[in-house]
């Protein structure tokens, strides 16, 4: 080990810091700083970097976190890998509270600041909003998801929140139609409440097919991704060159809303992000999820709403689910039921995926 020298990272407030010959830092703190280590990759996904910590002009990544006996925490940091995107940076010197006025005590070789008296805020700590004790015992992620659901589902039908919700939904919906149209060789232009699509060209379809093959080859080392892409390559021409691709375009708008709802809700679990950012993701996710879940449910049980859906369309033709129902000779309720099951299943899979069950740093607050 090489102790920190002049010009290098220097420990603060009694932390123990050593730097090895590879430039990595071994930092021992008297308690958790809320940093998270790198998540290893798998056959289907790359590794996810740990917390970015800056020591002056130097930027490091937290590789490993180890809780030691007595409450101390050991962090292993390495110079930031340029392959990773830097989402947010935590300055080392700002991860501490101001030192107390009285001398610190040494406990098992680690300096600890005296704890504040009961009911007295710690020195330098920001003011906090009082919450009921049972809410404070909940993980931060649960509180963010609950607050987003309360606003989106409970207040989403009231002005001006409804205007914002409808705007987000229209944007994602029409972009979904556009992306699926382009994927199947049809040039498309999204508008406010409709998407203009053009005739399919064989050259466009072949270009997409070749692009899928190139992606499969480029990411061939990731087994899960490779297997999915091979399956997609096999079925793509059978969909693109038949009327089935038109039905995929019809469902693409609602599919995009459900997928983006899952993406937004998953990002609430990323505790390396700032709290306000995670709160916005929660709100956006529940906005998209609630609108589709309510719509499909009403199409199944509300006769008045179903009649309106049959007769009114901003494009002058049939609405998306009516097109699908007529094309396959099934009832609108059956199509709505299928869409509702997908709406319930996709975000649920995303929320309860094992990769999102992260305990370290769960209650960390970054503002």
Image (tube, helix red, strand yellow):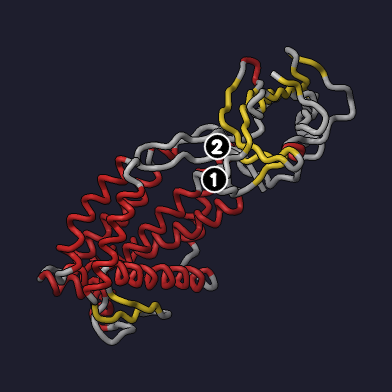
Q: Is residue 287 shown to the viewer in this render?
A: yes
Disc 2 marks which residue? Answer: 362
Q: Which quadrant holds residue 67?
A: top right
Q: What residue is rendered at 40% in x and 45% in y?
A: 351
Q: What residue is rendered at 24% in x and 77% in y?
A: 200
- In-front residue for pair 308/205: 205
Ranked by sequence position, the earlier of labels 2 and 1 is 1
**Helix or strand or loop: what does disc 1 sit on?**
loop
- In-front residue for pair 308/201: 201
Left or right of 250 on screen, residue 22: right
For residue 84, the mark is 1
Q: What residue is rendered at 33% in x and 81% in y?
A: 196
| Gap between marks 2 and 1 measured at Cα | 22 Å
| Residue 165 percent coordinates (x, y) | 47, 68
Mark 2 burial class by Cα count in 10 Å: few <14, some 14-19, many 20+: some
For residue 123, the mark is none
Does residue 53 sit above or below 342 in this rendering? above
Q: What residue is rendered at 58% in x and 44% in y?
A: 82
- In-front residue for pair 32/295: 32
Left or right of 218 on screen, residue 143: right
Q: How many marks?
A: 2
Q: From the image, which quarter does the N terminus lie in? A: top right
Residue lying furthest left: 329
| Residue 219 percent coordinates (x, y) | 35, 47
**Helix or strand or loop: what does disc 2 sit on?**
loop
Q: Which quadrant holds residue 187?
A: bottom left
| Residue 316 percent coordinates (x, y) | 28, 87
Q: Which quadrant holds residue 302?
A: bottom left
Mark 1 burial class by Cα count in 10 Å: few <14, some 14-19, many 20+: few
Q: Is residue 334 shown to the viewer in this render?
A: no
Left or right of 185 on screen, residue 266: right
């Amino acid at each position: 080990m090489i102790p920190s020298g002049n010009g290098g990272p220097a420990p603060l407030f009694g932390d123990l810091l050593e730097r090895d010959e590879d430039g990595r830092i071994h930092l021992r703190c008297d308690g958790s700083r809320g940093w998270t280590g790198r998540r290893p990759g798998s056959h289907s996904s790359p590794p996810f970097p740990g917390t970015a910590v800056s020591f002056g002009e130097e930027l490091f990544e937290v590789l490993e976190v180890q809780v030691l006996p007595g409450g101390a925490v050991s962090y292993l940091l390495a110079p930031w890998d340029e392959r990773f995107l830097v989402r947010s940076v935590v300055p080392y010197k700002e991860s501490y509270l101001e030192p107390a006025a009285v001398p610190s005590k040494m406990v098992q070789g680690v300096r600890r600041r005296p704890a504040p008296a009961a009911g007295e805020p710690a020195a330098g700590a920001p003011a906090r909003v009082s919450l009921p004790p049972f809410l404070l015992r909940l993980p931060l992620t649960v509180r963010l998801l609950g607050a987003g659901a309360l606003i989106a589902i409970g207040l989403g039908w009231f002005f001006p929140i409804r205007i914002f919700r409808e705007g987000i939904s229209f944007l994602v919906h029409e972009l979904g139609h556009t992306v699926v149209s382009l994927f199947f060789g049809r040039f498309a232009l999204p508008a406010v409440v409709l998407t203009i699509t053009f005739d399919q060209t064989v050259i466009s379809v072949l270009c997409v097919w070749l692009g899928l093959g190139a992606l499969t080859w480029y990411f061939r080392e990731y087994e899960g991704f490779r297997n999915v892409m091979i399956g997609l390559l096999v079925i793509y021409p059978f969909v693109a060159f038949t009327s089935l691709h038109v039905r995929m375009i019809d469902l693409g708008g609602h599919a995009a809303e459900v997928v983006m709802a899952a993406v937004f809700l998953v990002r609430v679990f990323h505790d390396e992000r700032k709290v306000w950012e995670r709160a916005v993701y929660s709100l956006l996710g529940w906005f998209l999820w609630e609108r589709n879940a309510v719509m499909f449910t009403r199409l199944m049980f509300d006769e008045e709403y179903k009649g309106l859906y049959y007769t009114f369309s901003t494009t002058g033709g049939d609405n998306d689910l009516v097109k699908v129902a007529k094309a396959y000779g099934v009832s609108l309720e059956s199509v709505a039921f299928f869409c509702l099951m997908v709406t319930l299943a996709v975000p649920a899979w995303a929320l309860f995926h094992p990769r999102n069950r992260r305990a370290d740093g769960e209650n960390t607050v970054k503002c």
